[in-house]
Amino acid sequence: MAHEILAATNAVVTLDVALPGIVWPWLVTVNMWAKSIGTGIVFMLFMLLRMYPEQAGKLRFPATVAAFISINIFLLFTLADLHQPFRMWHIFVYSHWTSAIAIGSVMASAFLGLLTLLGYLAFKNDNEKFDKVLLWTAILAIPVTLYTASLMAQCTARELWQMPAESAQMIFAALLAGSAFMILLGGNKLNNEAKNTLGVVLGLSALMAFIIYMSEYIFGPMKAEEIAATIGYIKNNGPYAVMFWVGQWMTYILPMLLIVLSRVGKSEAILKLAAILALVGLAIVKHVWLMIPQLLPMS
Amino acid sequence: MQLGFLVDLHLCMGCKGCEIACKVENEVPLSTWRLRVKYVDVGTFPETRRTFTPLRCNHCENAPCVRICPVSALHYLENGIVNIDKERCIGCAGCVMACPYGAIYIDPQTQTADKCTYCAHRVASSMMPACVVACPVQANIFGDLEDPTSNISKYIQKSQGGVQVRKPEKGTNPHHFYVGGGNVTLNPLASERVDGHSLFNKITTLPVGGHH
């Protein structure tokens, strides 16, 4: 569409200032990636404790520690991305509640507090209290993982980031990362049935996320010229075309195929390979989707 | 009082006087601009023409930057100006991302967001914004949109049907209008932006805030 407009107008910018480069850099990619892992682990621990309480019971402490570390990485990179990191406290003192950043910061801080409490309870082997607190932690993990989608939706004119699609992508990313991480963390503690369940979650979340990406890739350009121009960066010879497809294959297509193979061949090694590919690929997918709307000239 | 801006593109001759006046008045650092004039060439030689479009903050009634700012550093003044408190800004760059007009930048000296404030400090002293004073052809018209006798209101009434805003579909309700604009001047995607090439330099992008 953008190319048709150019042909129609036959216009070229001949003098302008240099436009800002990437505003939200790779630090934000790490932020989103670590948050997906942290919240995803909580979702999966909650599910496993209800479906396989005896085996998953052994994962209470290591999973909580892993989620705690992931959320701290997420918060650290959020802080590092600020141009005035020492003013971070302004968010809590001068909170502006229409901003997804302010709401997300408060929720993420509360989430970290609950994870700390979970870690303490797991260390003390107080399983009854742990499971009660885990319920509220899992509930809070939903808005914590979703708020970045709200933030992206508040970026007017970055039309690629549509709110319903981004919300779904954030949830699927958390389920995918959480299940992949728990497959690797489970080791000998989980039996084949539990690992197969995690494989199903990983495969289905990969399928759903892939369908959404492909829908946006194919149909997005038909909806708005900004989306058409943005998708242009990952089509044909676009600068992010290779990275986009590497990400799609690593995160979604290959893990889906490998999960089917692991079930047919009853191979845990193949399931672990699918989990590793999904975890690494997710960072690539997130990075591409974060970068390409920022390449679009706004003025 | 709701202050607004109107630029008559029929009159603008691309002298960049407003750009320079803004830089000097607001001590805007190198590599950043609150106001700039974009040149777009249209057509194929010899049937060509050059358009000039001054671009600045639109001071939207429904400003995405105000909505996304987590600390209310971006806020409305009573006269409708979208102002910024640089002491409160945390430099998250949410506003830079949210602004559909690319009007906000990270000041490389203070590492905080900054933008055109319609020269709020001058307005508070009953003076016109620096760019209005500098314009040799009075292409910049500034005033109260709620006062039917103000120059800007009269201009809008006189130019009915020819008054446009940038990206009206975004629902931001800009307080910044253009007369004589068109797709090429107001829509950034309607003109080709050749990488690494403009009349006087080969730089097309600069790092935000000087780092990252």
Image: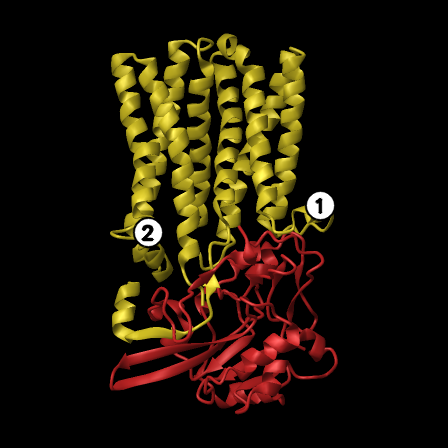
Chain colours: A yellow, B red
Q: Amino acid at mark 2?
A: Pro
Same chain for labels 2 and 1? Say yes or no: yes
- Spatial CA span between label 2 and label 1: 38 Å
Label 2 lies in what chain?
Answer: A
Q: In which quarter of the view is residue A103 placed?
A: top right
Please give the name of the residue rendered at 42% of the width and 64% of the height, measured from the top-left corner: B204
Front position among marks 2 and 1: 2
Q: In which quarter of the view is residue A225 placed?
A: bottom left
Residue B2 visible in the displayed image: no
Q: Secondary structure at mark 2?
A: loop
Q: Which mark is residue A89?
A: 1
Horizontal and vertical percent position of residue A288 = 39, 45
Label 1 lies in what chain?
Answer: A
Please give the name of the residue rendered at 35% of the width and 68% of the height, measured from the top-left corner: B193
Answer above or below: position of B128 versus B82.
below
Q: Secondary structure at mark 1?
A: loop
Q: Amino acid at mark 1?
A: Trp
Q: Is residue A116 left or right of residue A263?
A: right
Asked whether the residues under the numbered discs 2 and 1 touch, taking CB atoms below 8 Å apart as contact, a structural biologist would say no
Horizontal and vertical percent position of residue A132 = 63, 20
Answer above or below: position of B208 versus B59.
above
A154 and A12: which is toward the camera: A12
Q: Which mark is residue A239?
A: 2
Q: How many marks?
A: 2
Answer above or below: position of A25 versus A271.
below
Horizontal and vertical percent position of residue B55 = 50, 74
Q: Is residue B138 left or right of residue A231?
A: right
Residue A119 visible in the displayed image: yes
Horizontal and vertical percent position of residue B153 = 57, 86
User: Which circle's residue, 2 or 1, is located before the other in the chain?
Assistant: 1
Q: Which mark is residue B46?
A: none
